[in-house]
Structure formats: C-alpha cells, structure tokens
Image (tube, grey):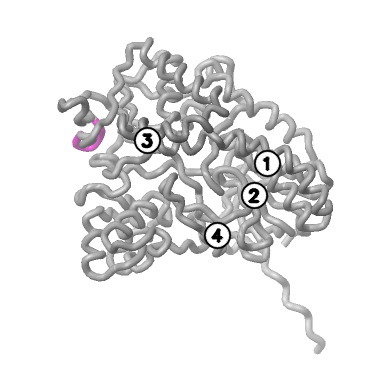
C-alpha cells in the first residue's frame, strides 16, 4: 500500500472537486478518484472537451463546471482518472482498478462524493432495446455528441424539461413529453411555495423550459397512467392514458425519468447508518450538517447524502472538506465552523426549493410498486409479482428475498431493483421502510477479474532468522 493521503475523495463531480480543492487549499495531501476520463461528474461530464456546438445544445449551466475543472488541473490534488473503486474499508483503505491492474491506497479521512443514480422506473417494456433513462441520453450527448431522435420522454421532474429543451436545441425535438405528476401533486406542493420563492431563479428557469417546449410544438401530456412500452425486441411505440383518453405514439426511443436518488453502494458496504426519506422516497446515509457520517473516518458530500442538485453539491463538498481537515488536526474546530458558516447559510437557501420540487414531482405508485408482471430485477429477471409472492410466504426483507428468488444477486448488486423491492415488501408486510431495510452490499462493489485481484500488492512476510 502506498503512503497514506490525508484525504481521499471518491467521485469528481461538483461535490468531489469542491471537496478536493478545499482540502488542498488547507495544505492536506489529497487524492481524487473517479471513473471518468476527465473531471465533471454527470452534471459537468466531459465539459473540458466540449465543443461550441455541443455547449450550445446543453446550455449555459453546463459551462459552470468548466472553471471548477480548470482549478482542479492547476491544484496540487492527485487526480486519478478512469479508475473503478471496488472496495472501501472501514479503516480508510480504498481498493480500485485501472486498465486491469488493481491498487490500494489509504486515507486519514475519506470523503464519499459518488453522487446520485436515477431512480429505477420499472414500467412494462422498460427492458426493451431503445428504452433508456434520460440521464443515459444526456451521457450520449455530453460524451459523444449523439442526440436521440424520434424520442418520447416519460416520467416527471425538472430534468425531463431540461432534456426536452436540449433535444429541441439540437434539432431533434421529442415526439412527446409524457408526465405522471397530477394537478393534485402540484396543488399539494403549494404549501411549500413561499419558502421555495428563495429559489425563484430556479422556478423561473423551469417555466422558461416549459415555454420553450410548448413553443417548439412538442405535445405534453400530464397525469399519465397505464404507461407501457411496446415492441418485439425493441421499442416501437408507447401507450398511456391521459385526459380521459387512451393514446399510442410510435417511437424507437423511450427516455425514462422519475428523479434521482442517492448512490448508497459504498456507504452501505462500509456499514454506515442510513434512514429512509419519505419525501424523496429513498434511503440516504445519516450525516450531520458537515456531512460527517456515523463513522468518524467518513464524510458524505453532495447528492450521495440527499438530493439537492449541483450548486448544493459544490457547497457540501467545501463544507465536508472543512470538517475533514479539522478531523485530522490541520485546522481547529473554531476555524472550521467560522469558515463553514456562510457556506451552510447559502446551502440552506439553495435547498429551500427542494420540498416544493419533491412534493410537485413524486414518483407514481405504479413505478414505486409496479404491476405483477413487470420485471424489476433486470439481472435475474425477477418480477414485482415474484416479490409479492415471496412476501406471502413469509419474506420480510430484501436480503431474505435473495434466498427466495435471487433478486439483487446480479452484477449490479441491486442498483436497479433495491428500492423497488423495499417498497413492495414494506407495502405487502405492513412494515416501515426502515424496518424492511435494504440489500447488504459487499465488495467487490463492481465486477473485477481474478487478474485484477491478483495484481494487488500483498504485505511481505517478515524474514525469520535461520
């Protein structure tokens, strides 16, 4: 194992870059690990390599990550790209692989900034070729300049409007935007409207996106139900009910989105405490205001600790870094709290809009608890009906469900099905989500080869006198 770093940051999105830069600023030795070839995370993916044409499509918010990435390049942070972190130890050790070779480093404090994943959207037909998440479509646009054509956007939330507008700007307007939120959802969200007005710029931006979609002539359906994706081997149409009528739209590209949820694979694997958030319909690790987790070695920054968006993530990264350098004795607690105070205040202001958005764009029941014949575990082809049958046989939790029918035992370790399995079991067994719990996650977090495992350096045995 190499000489230890003061701080190891996992993930080079807004939270991770901000954390690494802040820790570096205070004189800590910092290693930043990330799967991508360049910094930026999902929000600012490939921003340093973006062309002017691509930037015009993705919009001005995308460019905000450019300065952050340039500052990282000019810092003293050791930035290791293209690496896959597959094990994190409770002692601060981190094992990762790059180009089929594994390595292990250790940090005095670890900041986990691995962001969010899109909520699984198990609708009938969602496993067909041509069906993907809205986030996956954005990856294609940001990384390769590939623009989905003939697309139908399905789901709810502000990202749906952003991507629809980006497709319009790219000259490939979607055939329709099919939304699941209802007037009841929007009316219910009004109780959070006054605090949300602190984020009036975000609200105005959302209205501008909706107006741009309307101006482009893109049909928009709300309160959609009974959504299904059809086709033999690949998508050829989408059917749904809206406005008291049944609809069918021919398409080869169905883009799905029901918000994002914290990526808890690493935090689960090291046994950190988690809690279910009823407003965001997901689990997140338990942290204090500084991102400190239930284990003093680990902090969580950004959307991995609770969904807040890019600006909140960047602020959280700085706050977590201040806490980290304080924890290891580089700065005293008083200085940490003084420097964090304005950041905490600004983050609170940025988060004021969150309750409104969570209430206005909730995932619908038929996504949280799909129909019986809908596949929820893509790896093992387990259906929602299978999980309900397991519950009727006495299954109480996701880990017990593995013994009944292998959900969550594929290479993704439950990334696609975990939340859905918990939702169904909580409903069927009349337990709370916290009581049902989630899958136990074990290393390796992602598949590795025996060659990679064998390439790890092993401690040498001490020589004995003969």
Residue labelled with disc 4: 451
Q: Determine the CA span between mark 4 and mark 2.
A: 42 Å
State the image coordinates of residue 395 (x, y, percent, origin top left): 29, 68
**Magenta extent:** 231-235
Q: Nearer the viewer, residue 333 or 415?
A: 333
Which of the 4 image quadrants contains residue 70? top right
Q: Is residue 297 above or below residue 55?
A: below
Q: Determine the CA span between mark 2 and mark 3.
A: 28 Å
**Residue ID at (42%, 61%):** 434
Sequence-first disc among 1 and 4: 1
The quarter in which the C terminus is drawn is bottom right
Kindly report which numbered mark, 1 or 4, lies closer to the viewer in this rendering.
1
Of all residues shown, which one is farthest toward the left?
245
Q: Determine the CA span between mark 4 and mark 3.
A: 55 Å
Of all residues shown, which one is farthest toward the bottom?
466
Q: Determine the CA span between mark 1 and mark 2.
A: 8 Å
**Residue ID at (64%, 63%):** 295
Residue labelled with disc 2: 289
State the image coordinates of residue 405 (x, y, percent, origin top left): 28, 64
Residue labelled with disc 1: 344
* Residue 233 is covered by the magenta coloring: yes
Tell me whether circle 1 and circle 2 mark residues in contact (CB < 8 Å): yes
Query: Which element is circle 2 on?
Result: loop
Query: Which element is circle 3 on?
Result: helix
Question: In the image, 71: left or right of 226?
Answer: right
Residue labelled with disc 3: 188
Tell me whether circle 1 and circle 3 mark residues in contact (CB < 8 Å): no
């Amino acid at each position: 194992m190499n000489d230890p770093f003061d701080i190891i940051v996992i993930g080079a999105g807004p939270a991770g870059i901000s954390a690494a830069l802040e820790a570096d600023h205070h004189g800590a030795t910092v290693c930043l690990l990330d799967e991508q070839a360049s910094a930026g995370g999902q929000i600012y993916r490939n921003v340093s390599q973006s062309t002017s044409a691509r930037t015009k499509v993705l919009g001005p918010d995308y460019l905000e990550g450019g300065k952050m990435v340039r500052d990282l390049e000019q810092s003293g942070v050791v930035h290791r790209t293209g690496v896959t972190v597959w094990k994190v130890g409770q002692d601060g050790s981190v094992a990762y692989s790059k180009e089929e070779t594994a390595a292990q480093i250790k940090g005095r404090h670890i900041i986990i900034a691995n962001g969010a994943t899109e909520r699984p959207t198990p609708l009938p037909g969602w496993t067909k070729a041509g069906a993907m998440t809205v986030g996956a479509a954005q990856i294609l646009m940001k990384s390769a300049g590939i623009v989905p054509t003939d697309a139908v956007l399905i789901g709810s939330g502000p990202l749906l409007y952003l991507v629809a507008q980006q497709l319009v700007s790219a000259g490939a307007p979607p055939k329709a935007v099919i939304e699941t939120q209802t007037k009841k959802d929007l009316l219910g969200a009004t109780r959070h409207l006054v605090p949300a007005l602190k984020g009036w710029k975000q609200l105005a931006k959302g209205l501008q996106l909706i107006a741009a979609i309307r101006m482009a002539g893109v049909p928009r359906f709300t309160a959609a139900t009974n959504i299904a994706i059809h086709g033999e081997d690949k998508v050829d149409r989408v059917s749904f009910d809206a406005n008291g009528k049944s609809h069918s739209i021919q398409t080869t590209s169905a883009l799905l989105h029901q918000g994002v949820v914290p990526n808890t694979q690493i935090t689960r694997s090291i046994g950190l405490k988690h809690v279910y958030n009823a407003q965001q319909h997901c689990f997140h690790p338990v942290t204090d205001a500084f991102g400190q987790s239930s284990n003093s070695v680990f902090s969580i920054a950004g959307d991995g600790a609770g969904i807040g968006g890019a600006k909140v993530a960047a602020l959280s990264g700085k706050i977590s870094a201040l806490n980290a350098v304080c924890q290891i004795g580089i700065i005293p607690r008083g200085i940490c709290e003084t420097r964090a105070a304005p950041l905490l205040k600004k983050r609170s202001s940025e988060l004021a809009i969150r309750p409104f958005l969570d209430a206005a764009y909730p995932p619908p029941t038929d996504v949280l608890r799909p129909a019986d014949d809908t596949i929820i575990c893509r790896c093992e082809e387990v259906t929602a009906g299978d999980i309900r049958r397991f519950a009727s046989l006495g299954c109480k939790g996701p880990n017990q469900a593995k013994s009944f029918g292998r959900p969550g035992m594929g290479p993704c370790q439950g990334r696609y099905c975990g939340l859905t399995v918990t939702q169904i079991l909580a409903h069927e067994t009349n337990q709370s989500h916290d009581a049902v719990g989630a899958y136990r996650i074990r290393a390796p977090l992602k598949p590795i080869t025996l060659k990679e495992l064998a390439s790890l350096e092993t401690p040498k045995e001490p020589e004995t006198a003969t």
